[in-house]
Amino acid sequence: MSGDTRGEGDRKQSPDDEAALSARLQRLGERLATANRPSENGSGPRQTADRASAFARGFRLSTELVAGVLVGAVIGWLIDRWLGISPWGLIVFLLLGFAAGVLNVMRAAGVVRERKLGD
Amino acid sequence: MAVDPIEQFQIHNLFPIAKIGNTEIAFTNSAAFMLVAVLGLTTFLVMATAGRNLVPSRLQSAAEIAYEFVATTVRSTAGSEGMKFFPFVFSIFMFVLTLNMLGLIPYAFTVTSHIIVTAALALTVFFTVLIYGLVRHGLHFFNLFVPKGVPIYILPLIVAIEILSFLSRPISHSVRLFANMLAGHITLQVFASFIILLGGALGVLGWVGGVLPFAMIVILMALEMLVAFLQAYVFAILTCIYLNDAIHPGH
């Protein structure tokens, strides 16, 4: 008698067990999936790098600006040399380079969103 | 006697290797330190992974920490797809980190304080991004320069600015590492020369007073270790960000 009821209980329990098990497996799978890509949809990796040190951050912003201006100046100077339109190439590309430098700084500081995020 | 703070960055020829035309190619102290770094790194990683224990030894767990650290950086910045560039990023990170740390040993030469080295690394990253992006996405890669939702009449201007911004990457990428290492080592040298100057000028009193700049050197040394690690990390994470553009040019 008692053996019968236990058998019945077992049979009744097993589908429940299976459901619970598969639910747990699914949860584990989800956890593993999020663990494998920590912040792919997170708030942006650049910020974590920058917060590591304010000094590094400040230095980074200044080099970004200088790099933009420098590239503009070099390109403008080369165009002047090749096309002989001095000083217009330098003027135009220095301005463009400055704009690019400001864009770099704003991207590095996180003021402007990264191009690929969300677009 | 004044100490020249720039002298430590001088390149010496150790022995000649080959001669192309009139250019002599010599094995320099810079090359020697790069070789030491590569050999040291290879020995460390080979020895650390030789055991392959489930419960890692100290050496193995150091290697595993390095792996996990770079892997997390790559995944969080360039996504799971970026992991195909993991060997590249790991090599760059470990190479730069080792060179930075080696440079902090007194009398050692700091390879990364020469812009030609950091520029070569940054240009390698730049051309990797360019070539991989073009091979993988074809001309679609140039969509990187065309942001969405910009009115057609200012589009040429925006595209020109975006291209300049793209071209300026290797410059800021290389200058950052080089300037940090250069400035740090010059500062250390200047403070160290204060001790000698004080001792030479004031005798015993000067040597006692030299304790102050010496304390400063100790503090700066700690800061320099942080900077050495941080700059290697920043170099690696920027590499990942640029590679991300090659993998997903957006839109």
Image (spheres, coloured by chain):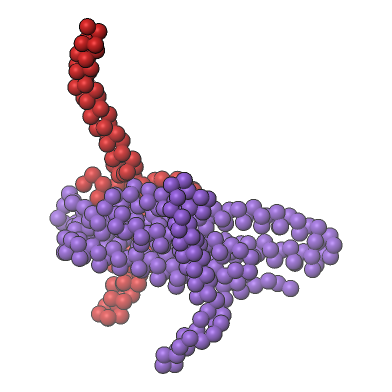
Quarter of the figure with the N terminus of chain B? bottom right
Which residue occupies the foreground of this view, B40 or A107?
B40
From this viewpoint, is residue B106 visible? yes
Quarter location, residue A67: bottom left
Quarter location, residue A84: bottom left
Q: Is residue B219 left or right of residue A4?
A: right
Looking at the rendered structure, the number of numbered marks drawn on it comes to 0
Q: What residue is shown at x 34% (from left), y 65% (from top)?
A: B125
Colour assignment, chain B: purple
Above or below, B175 relative to B151: below
Q: Is residue B212 left or right of residue A62?
A: right
x, y percent for residue A14: 21, 21
Colour assignment, chain A: red
The residue lying furthest to the top in this view is A1
x, y percent for residue B107: 63, 69
From this viewpoint, is residue A86 visible? no
The residue lying furthest to the left in this view is B152
x, y percent for residue A88: 28, 72
